[in-house]
Image (cartoon, rainbow, N blue to C red):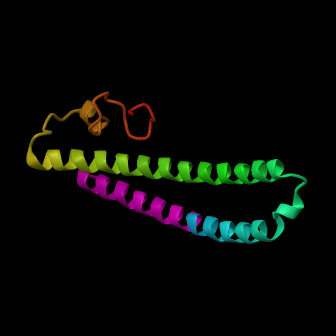
Amino acid sequence: MDRTESYLSILDAAAKIQLNVALILEAKALHAEKSRNWICHHLSTAAYENNADHLKNTSEIHEQLISVIEGITKMEVAFAKNLNLLIGQDEEEASGMGAGGGLGDMFNFGSGSGIGIGSGLDK
């Protein structure tokens, strides 16, 4: 398999991951809608002894939602960064600037540290 086929295989895998992420997010949205309906009908002010308990419980729910959104955002940023590095290297090689060759260049993917994609250490 040559380098172009490898890149196409990587891009195809990334597209499949994005499709699966979209399906997961769709299921999450459906679950969030059901949760919203339950919360709106059951977590009224009358269900709590005082306003502080009500505020604490709703704050916890919001923190959980923000945590989910942050996790999704981090995941998508990582996907975009990895694809950008992959596409960036491919464009450099096409223009003749990245003609160094060797196995060291194959795992660099444009990061200055020489650490490969997905290691989490190339921030």
Query: Residue sitting at 55 percent across and 48 percent down?
Result: 71
Q: Does the magenta stretch include residue 91?
A: no
Vertical side of 35 occupied by 75: above or below: above
Whether residue 108 sits left or right of residue 29 in the image: it is: left
Q: Quadrant of residue 37?
A: bottom right
Q: Position of residue 87 (x, y in %)?
A: 26, 51
Vertical side of 63 occupied by 123: above or below: above
| Residue stretch in magenta | 1-24
Q: Position of residue 120 (x, y in %)?
A: 45, 35
Q: Quadrant of residue 33?
A: bottom right
Vertical side of 64 occupied by 112: above or below: above
Looking at this rendering, what residue extends furthest in the front direction? 51
Query: Residue sitting at 8 percent across and 44 percent down?
Result: 96
Query: Residue sitting at 83 percent across and 49 percent down?
Result: 53
Q: Which of 34 and 89 lies nearest the eye of the viewer?
A: 34
Q: Does the magenta stretch include residue 17?
A: yes
